[in-house]
Amino acid sequence: MRITVSGLPGSGTTSLSRYLSERHGFSLISAGEVFRQLAKEHNMGLAEFGRLAEGDSSFDKMIDARQKEIAGQQDNIIVEGRLSGWMVENADLKIWVHAPIGCRVKRIVFRDHVVDEKTAGDVTLEREQCEALRYRSYYSIDINDLSLYHLTLNSQHWGVEALGAIVDTAIAQIKRESPE
């Protein structure tokens, strides 16, 4: 089974992906973690590294191609990333996790140790705009088009356990329906 988990920064995709990976024993690939590691290796913040990536498509394309390649060769995998639903066409389950910007900013302040919510909000919105431009430019993808997702989940209202339970039900249903 191949599952993709996508969403905007701070929506909870990484937490849900980790839950699913541990619960089902699936491997996990995280584009966000790869992007954060690359930013760190370049001694840059995420927004600054995003601007660099905006001028050099090789960063995004490398991450996207690697996700697609691994997901195509492996079964029982969770592929987490903003574009994973678009990149892993043969996914059995495509999930979009969303939450309002205020909720996401609070999480980002905590997760990334940002000084305050105003700064986190400004950086997050800049990052999202930058990414949306890159996705449209590189792949003609509108990140706001959620039509390809099987499930869209609001992480403001439910924690990771509750979201996981919803996805666990979907996984069980897919397993019942698929011929072995």
Image: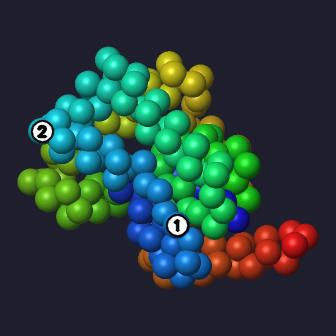
- Give the structural element (helix, strand or loop) at label 2: loop
Residue 26 against residue 93 in the figure, above or below: below
Q: Is residue 47 left or right of residue 142?
A: left
Identify the amino acid type marked 1: Ser
- The label shown at residue 43 is 2
- The label shown at residue 27 is 1
Identify the residue shown where x is 54% and y is 82%.
23
Q: Residue furthest left?
A: 115
Identify the amino acid type marked 2: Asn
Residue 26, quarter of picture: bottom right
Identify the residue shown where x is 66% and y is 62%.
75
Which x, y percent locates residue 176?
85, 78
Residue 166, quarter of picture: bottom right
Q: Residues within 10 Å of mark 2 (few under 14, many from 20)?
A: few
Q: Residue furthest right?
A: 179
Please say whether residue 172 is visible from this viewpoint.
Answer: yes
Identify the residue shown where x is 23% and y is 62%.
111
- Which quadrant of the rendered structure holds the N terminus? bottom right
